[in-house]
Image (cartoon, rainbow, N blue to C red):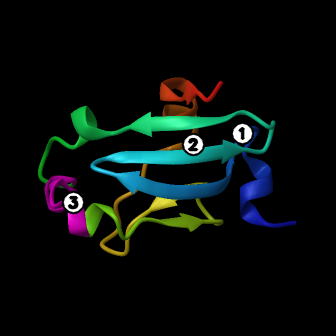
Amino acid sequence: MARYEHFPRHVIDAHYLGDYKVWLEFNDGRKGVVDLADELHGDELSSLRDRGRFAQLYLDYGLASIAWHDGQDFAPEFLYERLKAVN
């Protein structure tokens, strides 16, 4: 079993939309947009304030979420709570 299958909710698809917005789809079928502009505080996330670096996000199946190559990520539960559903 893949590691992500241990998470009750996990990201199965992600697309960078521009600025600090990401389109996400979760394993329960819920999908929408998360704006992470207000979440990029602290030293650990400071490099993601650069939109070019932020745009390099990828779907990390081990974490069941989005991540960046410098080691930053957001928990899938955190993203799920902030998801604005697409109508």
Residue that label 2 marks:
76
Q: Position of residue 37 (x, y in %)?
A: 25, 39
Residue that label 1 marks:
9
**Which residues fall within the magenta stretch?**
45-52
Q: What's the residue type where badge 3 is placed?
A: Arg
Marks 3, 1: nearer the viewer: 3
Q: What's the residue type where badge 2 is placed?
A: Pro
- Identify the residue at image location x=30%, y=47%: 20
SS class of the residue under badge 3?
helix
- Identify the residue at image location x=25%, y=68%: 53
Marks 3, 2: nearer the viewer: 3
Q: Position of residue 38 (x, y in %)?
A: 23, 32
Mark 3 / mark 1, whichever is N-terminal? 1
Query: Does the residue at mark 3 contact the one at mark 2 (Cβ under 8 Å)?
Result: no
Spatial separation of the CA atoms under disc 1 and disc 2: 7 Å
Q: Quadrant of residue 7?
A: top right
- Identify the residue at image location x=51%, y=37%: 33
Q: What's the residue type where badge 1 is placed?
A: Arg
Total numbered labels: 3
Query: Does the residue at mark 1 contact the one at mark 2 (Cβ under 8 Å)?
Result: yes
Q: Position of residue 78 (x, y in %)?
A: 49, 33
Camera-nearest residue between 66 and 52: 52
